[in-house]
Image: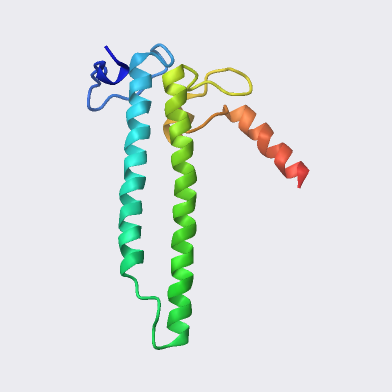
Amino acid sequence: MTKALKKRPALAKNYRPANDEKFMGVKQKEYFRRKLEAWKKDIYDQTKGTIEYLQGENVSHPDMVDTAAANADRQLELRARDRQRKLIAKIDKALARIANGSYGYCEETGDPIHLGRLEARPIATLGIEAQEMHERRERVGR
């Protein structure tokens, strides 16, 4: 049986990962996989709306100020979509980590990332302490 055909674990509708269960066990992995896939789908849906908006947007207005404002709005929207494209790449990497069993563990220390952090930022690759150290090094390097 191929991976795609394997039955996914059933999760209760109101299931939330808890600290008293096995860290990154089957239920937790499935929960975060679904969360990441839903997030990715939402981004794709937003992108479709943006594409339709941009295609229908008339960038030539009789007033030069209106044209400039419309072009600025268009550039802002395109930058937002570029950020979302990068976010989709991070989501895909998180899904790959779920598949290979490394999801939920800090890339620097190997320690489990707190469930609250993963709930808030499911693409997190660093635990809180490692993230704080990383940010401190960035500030010093500037």
Q: Residue at x 43, y 74 (%)?
A: 70
What colour-coding does the image apply? rainbow
Query: Is 38 placed left or right of 122 in the picture?
Result: left
The N terminus, quarter of image: top left
The residue furthest front is: 2
| Location of residue 19 in the rendering, given as x and y in whole percent from the top left corner | 42, 17
Query: Is 132 placed left or right of 122 in the picture?
Result: right
Observer-nearest residue: 3 or 26?
3
| Location of residue 5 in the rendering, given as x and y in whole percent from the top left corner | 25, 18
Q: Residue at x 30, y 49 (%)?
A: 45
Please indicate, yes or no, whether residue 115 appears anywhere in the rendered image: no
Q: Is residue 26 above or below residue 134?
A: above
Quadrant hosting residue 109: top right
Q: Residue at x 48, y 36 (%)?
A: 90
Query: Is 127 placed left or right of 69 in the picture?
Result: right
Q: Residue at x 48, y 22 (%)?
A: 104
